[in-house]
Image: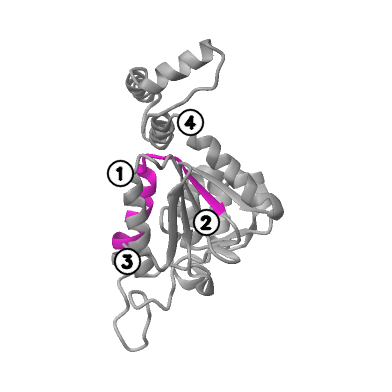
Amino acid sequence: MNYSLIQFDVRDSVARLTLNRPEKMNSFNAEMHAEVRHALDSIQTNAAARVLVITGAGRGFCAGQDLADAEVRFTPGEAAPDLGDVVERHYKPLVMRLSQLRVPTIAAVNGIAAGAGASLALACDMVLATKSASFVLPFTNIGLIPDTGCSWHLPQRIGQVRAMGLALTGKKLPAQQAADWGMIWEAVEDDTFATTVETLATRLATMPTKALFRTRQAMQLAHTHTFEEHLSYEGMLMRELGKSADYVEGVSAFLEKRAPKFTGV
């Protein structure tokens, strides 16, 4: 696929996906969704990719859904668009792909992350943001609910009380406060942001990919298990990973006092 609304490449084991509609604050339309899905699918079969970084072009990360897009445009006097269908066809597949991606994911929030843009960031494994960035959930301001997994992710990150407050008021949350609340991993000075993101991506790219993937799965499923069930689930994953070449390499490197070279995908 030729990309026109995103930029995507894999270099030095890092897949970089940039939402590229800066004139629209990188808001989603149907075409961008298709391009993002294609890029994410390509990572699943590209062994060279060991981590994914998602960011936005220009001064914003993502402003969510483009309300001027034909699929969601409201025209007075005509039948309202089926927003549930848009969620099922576009946003659900987006966050499901991220949750099932075989490599760790980093959201590099370089500016405003609003609506589904904030939800997209929360769907990634780690979120770094510039200190000038902010998060806002304006859904209720137009009569909707937080979607794209936001109502699932946000209470787990910051608790029910703060999640409800942000969702009901649509209050803008500065990146530093988001970090203080535990909503994101780190708020970074703007002038060192690119270097910080690159350093983290490089570090994750050298780590055992399957172990990172299984760690995500274990944490995602923890709240659906009883404690005893989860202990058994951890045992199942440990059994699998304990037979992997990366485990052998990790232990060997530790005993030999050298840096490991993980190769598993």
Name the mark nearer the viewer: 2 or 3.
2
Name the mark nearer the viewer: 2 or 1.
1
Task: Characterize the local packing of mark 4: few (<14), some (14-19) or many (20 or more) Cα atoms within 10 angstroms.
Answer: many
- Residue 226 place in picture, x, y as percent: 37, 27
Q: Which disc, if any, is residue 45?
A: 1
Closer to the camera in the image, 23 or 249: 249
Closer to the camera in the image, 12 or 221: 12
Q: Identify residue for label 4.
A: 207
Determine the secondary structure under disc 1: loop
Between the residue at mark 4 and the residue at mark 3, the CA separation in whole angstroms equals: 36 Å
- Mark 4 or mark 2, earlier in chain: 2
Magenta span of residues? 86-108
Mark 4 residue type: Met
Q: Is 2 located above or below residue 119 in the figure?
A: below
- Mark 2 or mark 1, earlier in chain: 1
Between the residue at mark 2 and the residue at mark 1, the CA separation in whole angstroms equals: 22 Å
Q: Identify residue for label 3.
A: 86
Q: Residue furthest top?
A: 255
Quadrant in which the N terminus appears: bottom left
Q: Residue furthest front?
A: 12
Task: Characterize the local packing of mark 3: few (<14), some (14-19) or many (20 or more) Cα atoms within 10 angstroms.
Answer: some
Q: Is 75 located above or below residue 63 in the figure?
A: below
Look at the numbered discs 4 and 2 and tell me whether their residues touch, using CB distance below 8 Å.
no
- Residue 70 place in picture, x, y as percent: 34, 78
Q: Identify residue for label 2.
A: 55
Determine the secondary structure under disc 2: strand
Q: Magenta region, mostly helix, strand or loop?
A: helix
Mark 1 residue type: Thr
- Mark 3 or mark 1, earlier in chain: 1
Mark 3 residue type: Val
Name the mark nearer the viewer: 4 or 3.
4
